[in-house]
Image (cartoon, grey):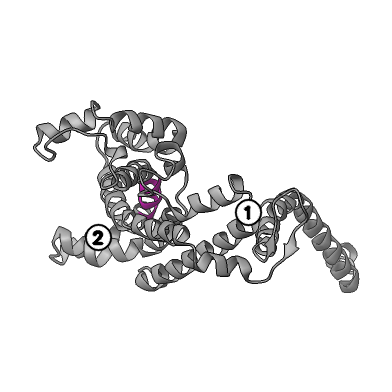
Amino acid sequence: MRRSEEVLPPITQRSGTSWRVGARTTLIAYAFLLPFLVLLVLYHFWPVIFGTYLAFTEYNVISPPRWVGLENFRELAGDDQFWSGVYNSLKYLLVVPVIQFLSIGVAMLVNRQIPGIGLFRTAYYVPVVTSFAIVGLMWTWMYQQDGPVNWVLTHLGLMGQPHSLLNNPATALLAVMFVTLWKGIGYYMVLYLAGLQGIPRELEEAAVIDGASRWQVFWHVTLPGLRPVILVCSVLSTISAIKVFEEIFVMTQGGPAGSTYTAMYYVYTKAFQDFKYGQAAAAGLVIAAISLVFGLINFRLTRGGKGL
């Protein structure tokens, strides 16, 4: 008898053993995933399902939810305060293109191999890990009438008389938007930096050898290579802009005169001040639908994120 026939088991026995090993490996994998799947269902899927249900009910925590159909959406349609919040949230979208351009620029700047580059990367990322409570208080002080921002603007001739930027309806939303811009650049910079380092350097070198200028290399090689990252960052920043809340809550609480009152702040006031959870959930669904529309627009503008 040959040696292989003495050692190897029959084919049917081997396939049965292989199936059992595969099944056991799969069960072990799902056992490790189970705690995270449970948390995913509890903290992501269940709130979405329950929130959607509440949008069609009248609920004030004390009494059980009462089914009212589309009544909450009809109230929203005639609520000027809600549409004022939606309008301010849409104005907040002006942050999105600015933060993307600046993040790409900073990422290209810190992508160079120069001495101390690690320090620059850390400095740009520090605002990201700083809580909005601290950031909001710091910028509230800086925007005051006798704060450093007023001093700089008046000395540059950009403003005649110093005034508190957060107490002026004409400047309050712009001031809060600048804080979002300042805090978010570091976050998107890291994503773009990873995208830049994933672009093959040979492509840029080949373009330079063929006589392409720096601008042509950026436009025809670097930017197409970054397109998948641009899609992700644009969608993330668009959703963040539409559902902006923390900056508003810490710095202005919707004022002055409703100039910074956003859609998510409307949801907060309806849920936790007026205790109209059904109407707040309906507003949340409308905001989610608006976010989905703008996400699809981003998908179209970036050509589905298809890179090189």
As drawn, is 26 to the left or to the right of 221? right
Which quadrant of the rendered structure holds the N terminus?
bottom right
Instruction: Check disc 1: other Cα within 10 Å, few if <14, some if 14-19, many if 20+.
Output: many
Q: Is residue 170 above or below residue 165?
A: below
As drawn, is 55 to the left or to the right of 137? right
Relative depth, front residue between 20 and 184: 184
Q: Is residue 247 above or below residue 100?
A: above
Residue at 34 percent of width and 41 percent of height = 179
Question: Which of the two discs, 1 and 2, labels the residue nearer the N terminus?
Answer: 2
The magenta-colored residue range is 187-195
Where is residue 81 drawn, in percent x and y?
45, 57
- Three-letter residue code for mark 2: Glu
Relative depth, front residue between 17 and 68: 68
Where is residue 170 drawn, in percent x and y?
26, 48
- Three-letter residue code for mark 1: Lys
Q: Image quarter for residue 127?
A: top left
Instruction: Check disc 2: other Cα within 10 Å, few if <14, some if 14-19, many if 20+.
Output: some
SS under mark 1: loop
Q: Which residue is mark 1?
A: 276
Can residue 229 be seen in this snapshot?
A: no
Can residue 202 be seen in this snapshot?
A: yes
Residue at 39 percent of width and 73 percent of height = 300
Residue at the far left: name it: 157
Alpha carbon of mark 1 to alpha carbon of mark 2: how far?
57 Å
Which of the numbered marks, if any, corresponds to residue 204? Answer: 2
Residue 175: within the magenta? Answer: no
Q: Is residue 244 above or below residue 132?
A: below
Disc 1 vs disc 2: Cβ atoms closer than 8 Å? no
Which quadrant of the rendered structure holds the C terminus?
bottom left
Residue at 69 percent of width and 68 percent of height = 68
